[in-house]
Image: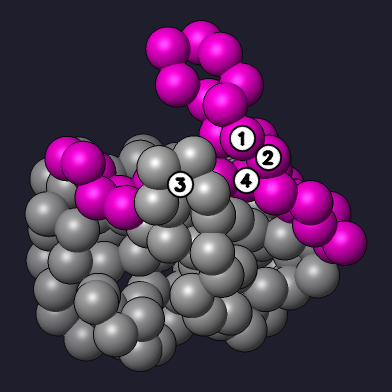
Amino acid sequence: ICVIRDDKKVGSFPISWDGLCVAALKDGGNEVAVGGGDNLIHVYTLSGNTLTEKTTLEHLGPVTDLSYSPDNGYLVACDANRKVLVYTLPSYEKFNKIELTIPQSQVTGLVWMDNEKLVSAGHDGLTNLWCNFGDVDPNMIHM
């Protein structure tokens, strides 16, 4: 994992697993989540140019994307097995599991529209809008 500031590499952290995607807390937060091919999310604290592992979260498959919500209230991650897991912050407790039941390939992308709306996309071209995301059972709109 490389730490980059102003387009320059200022630090690095060796890993023994395949890192597939990275997300950082918004608005100057100091936490970084890295999704791996090892079915784990590795959460680090960034201090200056140094990463220190904070916690590891189990996922259900190779993590293909992850993103912190705009208010830093959630971390959401998706995987190659059509699962989307939601973790509440700052505890990183699992809040919700969304399994796509429609014929959709692996989930490859996640984008927050705001704190209550999340868009997921897959290899098959399907895009889903998840509304009322703070609810235990969010609504899904196929697009």
- Amino acid at pointer 2: Ser
**Can you say whether 93 is above or below 124 in the image?**
below
Q: Residues within 10 Å of mark 1 (few under 14, many from 20)?
A: some
Q: How many marks?
A: 4
Does residue 78 appear anywhere in the picture? no
* Residue at point 54%, 64% (across, down): 52
Q: Nearer the viewer, residue 121 or 48?
A: 48
Identify the image quadrant of residue 40: bottom right
Identify the image quadrant of residue 73: bottom left
- Amino acid at pointer 1: Gly
Position of the C terminus by quadrant: top left
According to the picture, the residue beneath numbered tag 4 turns out to be 21
* Callout 2 touching callout 1 (CB < 8 Å): yes
Query: What segment carries the magenta color?
Result: 1-30
Q: Sequence-wise, which precedes: disc 4 or disc 1?
A: 1
Mark in the foreground, 3 or 2: 2
* Callout 3 touching callout 2 (CB < 8 Å): no
* Callout 4 touching callout 3 (CB < 8 Å): yes
According to the picture, the residue beneath numbered tag 3 turns out to be 23
Q: Give me the disc on residue 12.
A: 2
* Residue at point 61%, 35% (across, down): 11
